[in-house]
Amino acid sequence: MTYIVSMAELHAREKAGLPDTWHAFDIISQKFVSNYYLEVKGMSCPSFAKGERKDWPDFSQGDETTLQTIYLSVEEHQAWVQAKEDREVES
C-alpha cells in the first residue's frame, strides 16, 4: 500500500513552515458561527522502514514536542489548492 499525503496536510505544513517529517493524524471539518474550517492535527515522526506499511508515518514513534494543530479556513484552503493546481499546470 502507498501512503497518500492529503492536500490539507501539505497546506498545513506550508502554512506553518513544518518539515516533510510532520504528518497529519487527524483532519476534522468544523463550523464556527457561519464559517467552516479544517482542523489539522499532527506531529513529526519517522516512517516505517519495512513491512506492509513501509514509508507510512509511525506515530507511535512520534515526537510529541512537535504536536501542532493548524487551522485552515475552507476559503483559504480552496484558494491554496487552486494556486497549487495552477502552478503544476504551468510546470
Image (tube, rainbow, N blue to C red):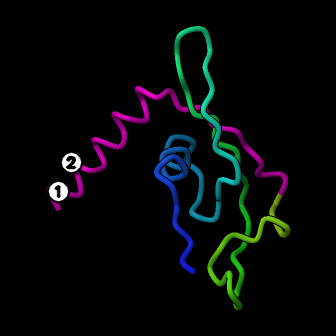
- The residue at 59%/52% (across/down) is 18
Residue 30 vertical position relative to residue 48 in the rendered view, above or below = above
Q: What element does badge 1 sit on?
A: helix
- The residue at 85%/67% (across/down) is 60
Q: How many marks?
A: 2
- Residue type of the residue flagged with mark 1: Val
Q: Is residue 89 magenta?
A: yes
- Do labels 2 and 1 touch, CB within 8 Å? yes
Q: Quadrant of residue 89?
A: bottom left
Residue 10 picture location, percent across and down:
49, 52
Residue 20 vertical position relative to residue 55 in the rendered view, above or below = above
Judge left or right: residue 38 versus residue 80. Answer: right
Q: Could you say which is closer to the camera, residue 72 or residue 51? A: 51
- Residue type of the residue flagged with mark 2: Asp
Q: Which residue is mark 1?
A: 89
Magenta region's main secondary structure? helix
Residue 17 vertical position relative to residue 57 in the rendered view, above or below = above
Residue 91 picture location, percent across and down:
17, 62
Q: Which residue is mark 2?
A: 86
Q: In what quadrant of the picture does the N terminus appear?
A: bottom right
Residue 32 vertical position relative to residue 43 in the rendered view, above or below = above
Give the spatial CA distance, label 2 vs label 1.
Answer: 5 Å
What range is drawn magenta here? 64-91
Residue 29 picture location, percent across and down:
60, 33
- The residue at 52%/66% (across/down) is 4
Judge left or right: residue 17 versus residue 43. Answer: left
- Counting other residues with Cα less than 10 Å from the Cα at mark 1, is it few (<14), some (14-19), or many (20 or more)? few
Q: Is residue 57 magenta?
A: no
- The residue at 69%/69% (across/down) is 57
Residue 50 picture location, percent across and down:
70, 91
